[in-house]
Image (cartoon, helix red, strand yellow):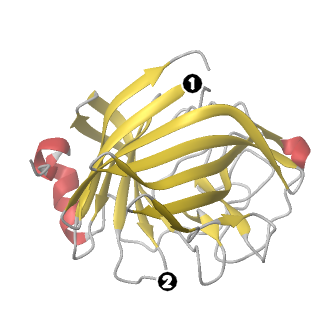
Amino acid sequence: MKISTAALVSGAVVAALATGTGHATSAAPPTASGPGHPCAQPGPYPLPHGGEPVRLDPADFTTRIDHPYWPMRPGTTWRYVERGGGEVATVRVTVTRRTKVIESVRARVVHDVVRVDGEVVEDTRDWYAQDSGGSLWYLGELSRSYEDGRFVGTEGSWMHGRDGAQAGVILPAHLSAGCRYREEHLAGEAEDRARILSTRETLRTPTGLHHDVVQTANTTPLEPDVLENKFYAPGIGPVLELDLSPERGSAVLTRVTHRAP
């Protein structure tokens, strides 16, 4: 059954999605992040942009991730149903107890498995760490793709500090509509960007009715026609992703479980 966006997202959001503008103001979105600026962060690092390098001090980071909009307690699993391109996939995302040291920064390993018709098509280890101000950083991923059960490559993989790759922010500690930042950067390979559209959305998913949801617009200069909107619910994490590109698609959270790792 095709997911009805209107059934999942508040009417105001649906109207905004039609134009790709969300609830950001008509003024140019702020990108600076100095003291007193609405995009300034409480931690030691400003929001990163483009391909600018960042020097991360391992003393500033922890693997105990408690961001209000995506807490990553080891043993937590999110399950999604993803529709797009004529296929239906199931996605399982699990926070492991494992960590990985990247450029001296210890990161939490999150295991992400995508299946189509029960067969694994992508198996990924993502690496996250939280800075002392509370911003959630993304330090890279190792993604393995499969076709008909055969390993076919690691396209999309990258690691902070390797081959010029730079870490990005998935969720700032201070969330303010209009703020822009990069999520990842490996020139020509991984250049995801995000802009916060709203921090006060309401939407219903199979996991319930969620208030004060953060909505982001996600783009990449590598694919100018691609536009995604992601929705993060407090205390849970990503609950909905909408692909607003010509092909259209969605990923909807169906279940969250917690168990001792």
Q: Which residue is at a point 57% across and 24% down the rendered structure image?
A: 75
Residue 51's disc is none
Q: Nearer the viewer, residue 62 or 154?
A: 154
Verify CB contact (< 8 Å) between mark 2 and mark 1: no
| Spot occupied by residue 143 in the image (x, y as percentages of width and height) | 57, 60
Mark 1 lies on residue:
75
Whether 257 is drawn above or below 131: the answer is above
Whether 43 is drawn above or below 102: the answer is above
Q: Nearer the viewer, residue 183 or 23?
A: 183
| Helix, strand or loop under label 1 | loop
Local packing at callout 1 (Cα closer than 10 Å; few below 14, some 14-19, many 20+) is some
Local packing at callout 2 (Cα closer than 10 Å; few below 14, some 14-19, many 20+) is few
131 with respect to 17 (left or right):
right
Q: Which residue is at a point 63% across and 57% down the rendered structure image?
A: 141
Q: How many marks?
A: 2
Give residue 255's quadrant in the image.
top left
| Spot occupied by residue 19 in the image (x, y as percentages of width and height) | 22, 71
Q: Which residue is at a point 67% across and 66% down the rendered structure image?
A: 158
| Helix, strand or loop under label 2 | loop
53 with respect to 177 (left or right):
right
Residue type, numbered disc 1: Gly
204 with respect to 155 (left or right):
left
Query: What distance separates the C-alpha of mark 2 from that of mark 1?
Result: 34 Å
| Spot occupied by residue 224 in the image (x, y as percentages of width and height) | 40, 84
Residue type, numbered disc 2: Leu
Residue 222's disc is 2
Q: Nearer the viewer, residue 32 or 150?
A: 150
Of the two numbered discs 2 and 1 on the same chain, state the one appearing first in sequence: 1
Give residue 60's quadrant in the image.
top right
Whether 77 is drawn above or below 139: the answer is above
Q: Is residue 15 visible?
A: yes
